[in-house]
C-alpha cells in the first residue's frame, strides 16, 4: 500500500487503485465475450486463443485485486478497531481471505506454468519466484495446519467445539496479523507484475489488436460498446 500519508489515507488510495484494476479486468472480459459471441456468428472457425488468454489472465488479476481489496479494508478497520472483539472479527476474515485466495490460485497453477514454460519461457523464473514466496508464506504461517483450522472451524464455519473456537481466537494478535497481511501483499504485488508483463508482450498486444480490428469491421456498434464500459 502507499505509505506516504496517514495510514487511512494510504489505504483509501490503495482501495481506489485496486478497485480500478478490478473494474478494468472485468470490463475487458465483458468486451471479450461480446466480441467472441458476435464474431462466432460471422466466422465460426475463427481462433479466439489470444482473447481466451487475455481473459484468463484478467480472471487471475481479478482474484489478486479482490484479495487486495478485502485485506486493505481489513487492515484499515483493524488499525481503527476500538475493542478486542472487533480485532478478532477482522483477523478471522483476514485468515479466510488469504486461505481462500491461495485455494483459488492453485486452480490456475497449471495454466500459469504452461504460459511461463511454453508460451513465454523467459518468464519461468519470475513465476518460480512468486510460487516460492507462496511456499515460504505457507510454511511461516502454517497454512496446512493452523490456517486451515481457523478457516474450517472459525472464519469459514463456526465449530461446535466451542473450546477449540475460544482457545484459538484468544491467541489472535493484531500486530502479527498486520505483518502477515503485508507479507501476503508482497506476493500479490509480484503476481500482478508477472501478469502485467505477459499482457504487455508486443505479440500478444498485436494479436489482440488484430482481432479487435476485425471486430470493428464486422460489428458497427463495437465502439459504442467499448465506450459504454469506460
Image (cartoon, rainbow, N blue to C red):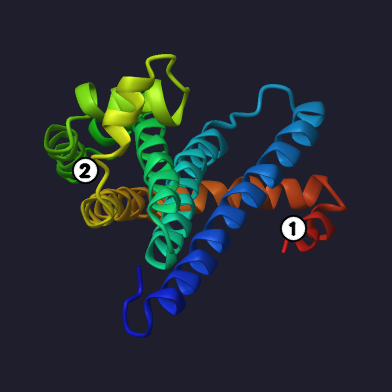
Quarter occupied by the N terminus: bottom left
Visible residue check, residue 41: yes
Figure quadrant of residue 92: top left
- Look at the numbered disc 1 and give the secondary structure of its residue: loop
Residue at screen point 25% across, 55% down: 186
Residue at screen point 80% across, 35% down: 38
Q: Nearer the viewer, residue 152 or 37?
A: 152
Visible residue check, residue 104: no
Image: 83 above or below 171 = below
What x and y, as percent, mark residue 11? 44, 70
In the picture of the structure, the residue carrying the numbered disc 1 is 229
Residue 92 has which mark?
A: none
Which is closer to the viewer, label 2 or label 1? 2
Q: Decide which of tag 2 and tag 1 comes sooner along the chain.
A: 2
Q: Is residue 99 rendered to the left or right of residue 228?
A: left
Q: Nearer the viewer, residue 202 or 169?
A: 169
Q: Nearer the viewer, residue 177 or 42?
A: 177
Image: 106 above or below 20 = above
Q: Is residue 194 rendered to the left or right of residue 30?
A: left
Mark 1 crowd level (few <14, some 14–19, many ≥20, 10 Å Cα): some
Mark 2 crowd level (few <14, some 14–19, many ≥20, 10 Å Cα): some
Residue at screen point 22% across, 27% down: 146
Q: CA distance from mark 2 to mark 1?
A: 32 Å
In the picture of the structure, the residue carrying the numbered disc 2 is 130
What x and y, as percent, mark residue 16? 54, 68
What x and y, as percent, mark residue 208? 55, 48
Quarter occupied by the C terminus: bottom right
Amino acid at each position: 500500500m502507499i505509505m506516504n500519508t496517514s495510514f487511512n489515507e494510504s489505504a483509501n488510495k490503495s482501495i481506489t487503485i485496486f478497485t480500478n484494476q478490478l473494474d478494468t479486468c472485468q470490463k475487458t472480459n465483458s468486451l471479450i465475450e461480446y466480441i467472441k459471441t458476435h464474431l462466432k456468428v460471422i466466422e465460426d472457425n475463427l481462433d479466439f486463443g489470444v482473447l481466451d488468454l487475455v481473459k484468463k489472465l484478467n480472471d487471475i488479476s481479478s482474484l489478486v485485486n479482490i484479495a487486495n481489496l478485502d485485506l486493505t479494508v481489513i487492515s484499515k478497520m483493524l488499525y481503527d478497531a476500538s475493542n478486542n472483539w472487533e480485532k478478532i472479527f477482522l483477523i478471522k476474515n483476514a485468515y479466510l481471505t488469504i486461505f481462500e485466495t491461495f485455494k483459488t490460485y492453485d486452480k490456475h497453477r497449471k495454466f500459469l506454468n504452461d504460459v511461463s514454460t511454453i508460451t513465454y519461457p523467459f518468464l519461468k523464473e519470475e513465476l518460480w519466484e512468486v510460487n516460492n514466496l507462496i511456499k515460504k508464506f505457507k510454511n511461516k504461517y502454517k497454512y496446512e495446519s493452523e490456517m486451515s483450522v481457523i478457516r474450517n472451524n472459525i472464519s469459514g464455519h463456526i465449530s461446535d467445539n466451542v473450546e477449540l473456537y475460544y482457545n484459538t481466537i484468544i491467541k489472535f494478535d493484531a500486530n502479527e496479523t498486520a505483518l502477515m497481511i503485508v507479507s501476503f501483499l508482497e506476493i500479490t504485488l509480484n503476481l500482478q507484475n508477472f501478469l502485467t508483463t505477459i499482457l504487455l508482450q508486443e505479440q500478444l498486444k498485436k494479436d489482440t489488436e488484430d482481432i479487435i480490428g476485425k471486430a470493428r469491421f464486422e460489428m458497427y456498434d463495437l465502439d459504442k460498446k467499448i465506450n459504454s464500459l469506460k
